[in-house]
Image (cartoon, helix red, strand yellow):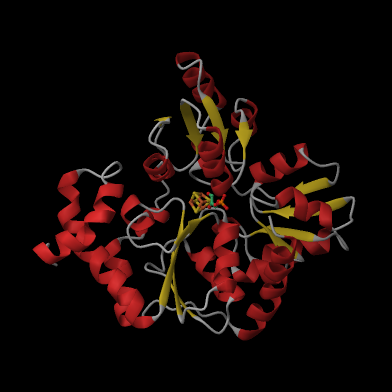
């Protein structure tokens, strides 16, 4: 695609914003896609929902909503658009389809997975239910529709404690993230039975790394995602979902901040918080990074990569997601 004078002019306001997070040399290759995708969105009545870990050119250039997984699920249910393009990973697109079954939901790369979603199957959940008969099953949205179908309710990192406590049970099965389960256990009296799944991005952070950064930057605020190991959370000032982290920075305007999470998010948040200095140990999610502008363009233009879920699984999985949506944030 060519970076014409017309495209340069039309995308200038976006460039002014994004230039803080993007080297100038990259702009001529992104701008034509941003221009064409935004045109296609209007023509096809499509909405682009993007996760906070998407690259700045997606987050600031084409997304209608950029948010955490809970907000993306709730937005999918609300939208009036005909097509939802989910710039994120497969479980997020599946969740959007469960929330909005009559819409066409497409994902730019079907292979954009998640180490947590891959750590457990519907069969594993059936086995757990046999082992602990009668206990409610809470599954993180970072799971397949098969797993959601076997669960009583879903949760995200934004509402995990609230969801667990809503069930009125003194013990629950919570899966698949062992570290999120650990975080929930620290914040509730309900006994948590967990699974051994981990996020391949957050498990890499260590408490020592955070302590070392704090020593070098005594005035820094450390905010961690609850998928991090327990020593990382203990060394942090605050833990919350990706959108909760964004809000913390916006509301508190710390001089210096460390977001212990996928590192692209710091670039995105930096654009809107120019007075905050971000310290960035960089762990990238290879699945999130499979989503690129040219793949968004192709799948929206050709309406390919549509999410399909078999009827029976979808009916059961939808109940778990809707039950979570009723609880909200
Ligand atoms: P959030 O729900 O906090 O956006 O997290 C999703 C995720 O995949 C984090 O790794
Ligand atoms: Fe999954 Fe971790 Fe990537 Fe989030 S960051 S999508 S939890 S692998």
Q: Quadrant of residue 155?
A: bottom right
Where does the image place residue 129, in percent across and percent down from the top left?
80, 63
Question: Toward the viewer: 262 or 60?
Answer: 60
Left or right, residue 169 beside residue 318: right
Q: Residue at x 31, y 60 (%)?
A: 292
Left or right, residue 75 beside residue 46: right
Q: Quadrant of the N terminus?
A: bottom left
Asked if one can make out residue 4 in the rendered structure from this viewpoint, the answer is no
In the displayed structure, would residue 154 be above or below residue 178? below
Q: Quadrant of residue 30?
A: bottom left
Where does the image place residue 145, in percent across and percent down from the top left?
61, 70
Q: Quadrant of the C terminus?
A: bottom right
In the displayed structure, would residue 154 be above or below residue 270? below
Q: Residue at x 31, y 54 (%)?
A: 57
Asked if one can make out residue 104 in the rendered structure from this viewpoint, the answer is yes
* Numbered-mark total: 0
Question: Toward the viewer: 254 or 137?
Answer: 254
Where does the image place residue 244, in percent across and percent down from the top left?
59, 45
Q: Residue at x 39, y 36 (%)?
A: 282
Where does the image place residue 228, in percent across and percent down from the top left?
58, 38
Q: Quadrant of residue 28?
A: bottom left
Question: Toward the viewer: 143 or 159?
Answer: 159
In the displayed structure, would residue 279 be above or below residue 22? above
Question: Toward the viewer: 248 or 150?
Answer: 248
């Amino acid at each position: 695609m060519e970076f014409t004078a017309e495209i340069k002019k039309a995308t200038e306001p976006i460039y002014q914003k994004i230039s803080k997070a993007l080297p100038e040399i990259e702009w001529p290759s992104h701008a034509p896609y941003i221009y064409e995708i935004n045109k296609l969105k209007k023509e096809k009545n499509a909405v682009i929902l993007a996760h906070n870990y998407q690259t700045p050119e997606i987050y600031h250039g084409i997304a209608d909503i950029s948010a955490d997984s809970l907000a993306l699920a709730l937005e999918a249910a609300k939208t009036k658009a005909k097509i939802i393009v989910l710039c994120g990973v497969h479980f997020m697109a599946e969740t959007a389809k469960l929330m909005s079954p009559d819409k066409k939901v497409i994902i730019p790369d079907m292979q954009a997975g998640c180490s947590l979603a891959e750590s457990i199957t519907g069969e594993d959940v059936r086995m757990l239910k046999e082992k602990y008969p009668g206990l409610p099953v809470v599954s993180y949205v970072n799971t397949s529709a098969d797993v959601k179908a076997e669960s009583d309710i879903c949760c995200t990192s934004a509402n995990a404690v609230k969801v667990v406590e809503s069930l009125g049970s003194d013990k629950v099965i919570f899966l698949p993230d062992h570290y999120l389960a650990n975080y929930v256990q620290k914040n509730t009296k309900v006994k948590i039975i967990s699974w051994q799944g981990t996020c391949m991005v957050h498990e890499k952070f260590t408490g020592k790394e955070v302590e070392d950064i704090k020593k070098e930057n005594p005035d820094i605020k450390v905010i961690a995602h609850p998928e991090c190991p327990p020593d990382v959370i203990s060394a942090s000032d605050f833990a919350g979902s990706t959108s909760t982290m964004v809000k913390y920075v916006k509301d508190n305007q710390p001089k210096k901040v460390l977001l212990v999470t996928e590192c692209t998010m710091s670039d995105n948040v930096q654009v809107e918080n120019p007075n905050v200095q971000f310290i960035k140990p960089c762990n990238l999610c290879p699945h999130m990074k499979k989503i690129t502008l040219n793949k968004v363009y192709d799948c929206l233009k050709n309406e390919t990569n549509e999410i399909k879920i078999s009827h029976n699984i979808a009916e059961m999985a939808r109940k778990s997601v809707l039950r979570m949506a009723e609880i909200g944030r």
